[in-house]
Amino acid sequence: PQMGPAWGLNTITLLGRNFDSVSDEMYVEFGPSIVPATIVSNTVATCKAPAHGVGFVSLRVVHGENPTGLMEYASDKRGGIAYEYLNVVMLDALSPRSSPTRGGTKVVVAGENFPGVSALFCSFGGTTSAAEWLSTNQIACNAPSAIEPSMVSVNVGIVDADAGFVSLTQSAIQFRYYEEPRFHGLHPSRGLTTGGSVVKLTFDSSSTQHDS
């Protein structure tokens, strides 16, 4: 991805050419920091992003035995490719805190430092859902469906075609999926026009309790 969390450690995929023609080790500069890279093919290499303060840095690929005095190997000649470090997202609350397993429930996530980027997603137990950015303190996501009733962890991050979901949170919030009660019938089926009749509703699921 072209952005990631300030604490680093996420995998970066580099696309270019002539990577496998390098006889020396390859490194990647993230501003003042240098990390080793792994050559995957002639056009693909990977590395782990180092920790850095929030903001943009120039990313360059270099090679040589001494990473403090490297020759430039393959980079944007205009000064490097821009990579953005994003702030840590703090999660405070979910509303609602549960959904039927069929999903589709709109969940408002409250917290701090939500970035207004198009690649922002929520992760419900590993299943991602696109986020609607409302403010730096609030986003909204539709809960995806779940196979069965369960408790899952909700995280917020970015999604990249190569790296997948990259979390921007260091602590998650729990979210509950419940089995939606199925209505069977009611008794009695008629009552007085003046009202006041006690009506018993019958369901076939024991999971009739949920949070709102």
Image (cartoon, rainbow, N blue to C red):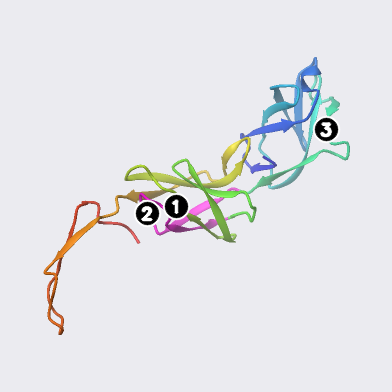
Q: Residues within 10 Å of mark 3 (few under 14, many from 20)?
A: some
Quadrant (top left/top right/bottom left/bottom right) for the C terminus: bottom left
Check if residue 104 falls in the magenta segment.
yes
Count the labels in the image. Answer: 3
Query: SS at mark 3?
Result: loop
Among the two numbered marks 1 and 2 on one chain, the one whose residue lies closer to the N terminus: 2
Range shown magenta: 88-112
Q: Nearer the viewer, mark 1 or mark 3?
A: 1
Q: In this view, does 35 lie above or below 172?
A: above
Residue 99: which numbered mark, if any?
2
Q: Position of residue 165 (x, y in %)?
A: 56, 40
Indicate left or right for 165 with 184 as reference: right
Among the two numbered marks 1 and 3 on one chain, the one whose residue lies closer to the N terminus: 3
> What is the magenta segment's predominant secondary structure?
strand
Q: Residue at x 12, y 72 (%)?
A: 198
Q: How crowded is mark 2: few (under 14 residues within 10 Å), some or many (20 or more)?
A: many
Name the residue carrying label 1: 143
